[in-house]
Every structure is written in structure tokens, then in C-alpha cells.
Image (cartoon, helix red, strand yellow):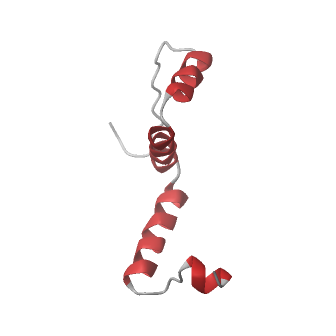
């Protein structure tokens, strides 16, 4: 497969069936699925994760207590 070509995956499942399956997931599983979906479809999302991890490693983050005074 050459780079830059569009790929199509046909899965023989209706949107309603996929939505029903997602609704049956436990909350954490659903969150992980959505994160994976975003990551696989959005280079900007992946860049934001890398940037956040870099900020954390470089101690450029603040705790909730520091931000909100709690």
C-alpha cells in the first residue's frame, strides 16, 4: 500500500449495532475505546497527548489544588 492513499474498511455492522455495543461497555472500557478511536483518526489528538506528556515530564503542570485552591 502506498502512503497517502485512502483506505476503506467495510464491516457489515450497522451504526445502531455499534452504538448498542458501546453503550454496553463499562465506563472505563468506553473511555478507552473513545480515546483509541480519537487517536486513530486524529493526528492533532496524538500531538496533544505527546505535548501533555512532555509538559508533565518537564514539570510544566499544576495540580487541581494549585489551579483551584482546593
User: Residue 19, relative to residue 38: is it above or below?
Assistant: above
Does residue 65 appear left or right of residue 10 in this picture?
right
Question: Where does residue 38 sit, x and y in percent of width and height?
Answer: 52, 47
Closer to the camera in the image, 1 or 52: 52
Q: Which residue is outermost to the front? A: 70
Q: Write the residue at 43% across / 68% down.
A: 50
Question: Where does residue 23 sit, x and y in percent of width and height?
Answer: 57, 28
User: Residue 45, relative to residue 65: is it above or below?
Assistant: above
Number of residue marks: 0
Q: Quadrant of the C terminus?
A: bottom right
Q: Write the residue at 45% across / 80% down.
A: 55
Q: Which residue is outermost to the left? A: 1
Closer to the camera in the image, 55 or 1: 55
Q: Write the residue at 59% across / 24% down.
A: 19
Question: Where does residue 20 sit, x and y in percent of width and height?
Answer: 57, 21
Question: Where does residue 40 sit, x and y in percent of width and height?
Answer: 45, 45
Does residue 57 appear left or right of residue 62 in this picture?
left
User: Residue 30, relative to residue 66: is it above or below?
Assistant: above
Q: Write the residue at 53% across / 58% down.
A: 45
Does residue 28 appear left or right of residue 16 in this picture?
left
Q: Quadrant of the N terminus?
A: top left
Does residue 44 appear left or right of residue 40 in this picture?
right
Closer to the camera in the image, 37 or 41: 37
Closer to the camera in the image, 7 or 12: 12
Amino acid at each position: 500500500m502506498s502512503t497517502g492513499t485512502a483506505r476503506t474498511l467495510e464491516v457489515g455492522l450497522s451504526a445502531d449495532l455499534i452504538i448498542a455495543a458501546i453503550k454496553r461497555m463499562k465506563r472505563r472500557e468506553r473511555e478507552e475505546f473513545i480515546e483509541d478511536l480519537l487517536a486513530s483518526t486524529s493526528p492533532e489528538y496524538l500531538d496533544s497527548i505527546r505535548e501533555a506528556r512532555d509538559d508533565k515530564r518537564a514539570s510544566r503542570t499544576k495540580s487541581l489544588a494549585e489551579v483551584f485552591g482546593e
